[in-house]
Amino acid sequence: EEKAEMHDSKEDPRLFQKGRPEYRSLSCDKSEPVETLPLEEGDSILHSVALSKDCQGPGTITDYFRKLSRLPGEQHAALLSEPRFNMLCCCAVKKIRLFSTSDLIDVLKACVRLAVPPTHHLLNACESEFCRRAWDMNLDQLLLVADCWRCLDRSVPSYLSILFSYANMHWKDLTLPQFVQLIYIVGEGRRSPADLAQKVESMILKYMDSFTLEEVGAICLGLFKSVSGISDHVMRKIADRVSLQMEDMSTYALVNVLKMLRYTRMDHLPLLKELGKVIPARIPVVNIQGIMHITLSCSALHYFDEGIMTAVAMSLPSKVTYCRSKDAAKFLWSFGCLDYEPPNEEEFYSCLIEQMHRKLHEFRKFPEHLLTGLLGLAFVKRFPEELIDFALRDEFVRKTRSSKYELKKDLFTLSKSVEIECPSYQGSLLPPQLCQEITEMVLNFAEQEIYVRPEIVETSSLLQSVLGGPEYVKNHMILPHTRSSDLEVHLAMDGRPIPFNSQDSVVGTKLKDIGISLTDDLMTQLIKGKTNSQSPMEMENEARDRSQEEAQTPHAGDPAARSGGAFLTDTELKVEPRSGHWFEPSLALPQQPQRVKLAIQVSNRNHYCYCSKRLLGLHCLKRRQLRQLGYVVVELPFWEWFPLLKRTRLEKLSYLHYKVFDPAL
């Protein structure tokens, strides 16, 4: 069982090489059976090396390496530490320019069999020599040497650059096996030559019907590992082929196709539907990393298939101890993203949370995985307090800054969600100053990218027409940590709209010059709707009293309160939860009895699972928290609202009137 669960990151990607005899000349097969060399003969070779006053010739040295590489595997470590073997390596280095290319390749292959360390001085000399003579070698030899370097786990960027340049010059002469082996090398080298991208696509299309299914998987893995872009057209051709022959494809190759599908964000429904038919029965015998990639592909593509997710959930508890921190986090994220709680939900979630505890030491190195898992749990309203406290401590927050990912927004979403949904939580939270900094960052982005989206701008404008002006609608983020906008509307209990958005009202109004002076008193009337008959002294005293009170109470003008979005016009509240963390008043206030606060959602298809009306986890979390804070969530589902945007203004106004003034509210 343990062997089945272990993924060999060096050998598994090479499985495609078993499919054609041509790969024997392009790759180094360590598993190829050879006649074992007796120990006595190996010792005799080493004795000859020690007795030799001068180094033997290149042919003899090559023969010694070939024979010694056939010693039993358990003898290899002892051989490498043998001084006489080191003498043989020194002789090879000394005479390296005298070796024929085929002999030098045999020496390198012997090093692969013997598992010579990648930093060994003999390998340094071999790399330099192969780079020097590369342009005099043929493509088979160049690919074979590159394969040996991969087997030795040695990074050779200079050699690979030469190989890619050579392949580029001889591109039209590449055979199918040479092309697939080249893409494998590109992937293992984790770099994609920019000048090959277009040629790679044309070659994929040329050989599409001739590739074996394992070769299709190998190509996808090579492109995925090297972060190589690929056009939708080519990816769709690959997906077309796989969807028709998925039953005959190994799970490993299929997972590699899914990785590339995920990378290109390709919504290929025939493949996804076929996946739902083929993969659930295979899940119990797939290793944990393969299951993770299948699950992650579904969530990344927002594709919900209950059969796949249930099969994963039922198989996971017995395999969970094989999960790395990354695997556990991605499982939690995927199920949370798709808002799916499986039939065995308690067993499923408890075993993964326990594994997160066991892998806590790994999260110090990979903080992004802990946040990924905790957000996935938050989506389905699960908050493991010990792990959350660990993630929001100052020490861990500092570690997130060294991650290659931007994690501030994830920390913000987690911390604010805990504040709203876990009133009894006593652990760490993000400091207010950091929350304010992230809020401003999120709101700045929203002003440039979200509030200005055509469907939101038009909906806001139409609502102003329905309700009577800009003071009745506010286009903003009520909950900035949920990263999407709301159109906020307040209604009295009799259904009458209540003006509350004084800021947008003043900014959006252009006063004509009709001879009226804009005095402070008139502005007060315009904004607050009442006549101010106080004397200047009384006004000053009241302002001073109010400023002292507001110094202790967050209010709508503060950045933190502005991020909450709702103005408290009827009452002023001070809400101070534990640990000195302030809620914005609009977030801490249960529903005001004098009014109904609507949070109108202009959703789009990216808020839902693919080809369905199933809301994604983040948006479920947002709506749940809005309701918890006293808002009534009003959906303008994209399948209703977007078609209406192309209809007459009267139809749009009628629809919005029905939504806002629904008696059920």
Image (tube, grey):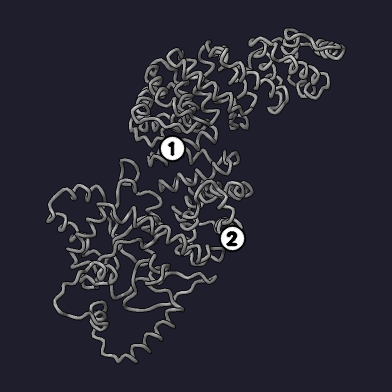
Q: What is the distance, in whole Å, between disc 2 and disc 1 at their CAs?
A: 33 Å
x, y percent for residue 477: 35, 61
SS for dot 2: helix
Q: Amino acid at mark 2?
A: Asp
Quadrant where the C terminus lies?
bottom left
Residue at x-position 25% and y-position 69%? 505
Q: Which mark is residue 297?
A: 1
Q: Is residue 505 visible?
A: yes
> How many tags in the picture?
2
x, y percent for residue 42: 80, 13
Tell me if mark 1 has few (under 14), some (14-19) or many (20+) residues whose alpha carbon lies within 10 angstroms of its own.
many
Which residue carries the number 2 mark?
Answer: 394
Q: Amino acid at mark 1?
A: Ser
Q: Which mark is residue 399?
A: none
Q: Is residue 237 above or below residue 618?
A: above
Quadrant where the N terminus lies?
top right
**Of discs 2 and 1, which sits in the foreground?**
2
Instruction: Kindly indicate the quadrant of the structure image that contains residue 513.
Output: bottom left
